[in-house]
Amino acid sequence: MKNFDEVLQKLVDEQEFLKSIQGRIVENYDIMMQNQQQNADNHEMVIQNQTTIIRNQEIIVNNQMNIVRNQKQIAQNQVTLDVIQQTQTYLLNIIKKLTGNEEPLETTKDFVENIRKQSEANRKGQNLNESSTL
């Protein structure tokens, strides 16, 4: 009978061991389900972040296009300002001729260029982004 009791005890022990393993399996399954839920939540956050990144990239592209447009406009404005300066120089030279103070066009150009250089020197060190400097 002792042998039977030993076998029975072994079976009981193994049954307890199996129950503990099944308990750990259930616990691991619960942990795995929680991890999967966390992964799903994280995946949703990643998708939201990617959407935000895409929107930001679209904004950056639009800003870059605006910068290029502004640079083109600046270049056009520089050409226009040059034409205006040349026209004003020519008109000043004609006015001087009409008032009896005739001088070569080159002298009038030098006069206007000196005014421009003086204006640049007066603005050195100023923040040209501030409206007070315009």
Image: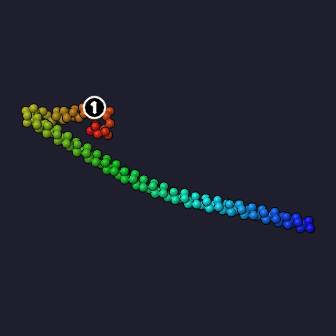
Residue 17 is left or right of residue 48, and the answer is right
Q: Residue furthest right?
A: 1
Residue 63 showing in the rendered view: yes
Image: 76 above or below 106? below
Q: How many marks?
A: 1
Residue at x-position 27% and y-position 32%: 122
Residue 117 showing in the rendered view: no
Q: Position of residue 93 (x, y in %)?
A: 13, 36
**Quadrant where the image shows the N terminus:** bottom right
Image: 30 above or below 120? below
To which residue does mark 1 refer?
A: 121
Residue at x-position 82% and y-position 66%: 11
The part of the image, by quadrant, that contains residue 102 is: top left
- How many neighbours does mark 1 have within 10 angstroms: few (below 14), some (14-19), or many (20 or more)? few
Pick the front one: 59 or 4: 4
Pick the front one: 120 or 21: 21
Image: 47 above or below 98? below
For label 1, the SS is helix
Q: Position of residue 34 (x, y in %)?
A: 61, 59
**Which amino acid does the dot numbered 1 rest on?**
Ala
Colour convention? rainbow
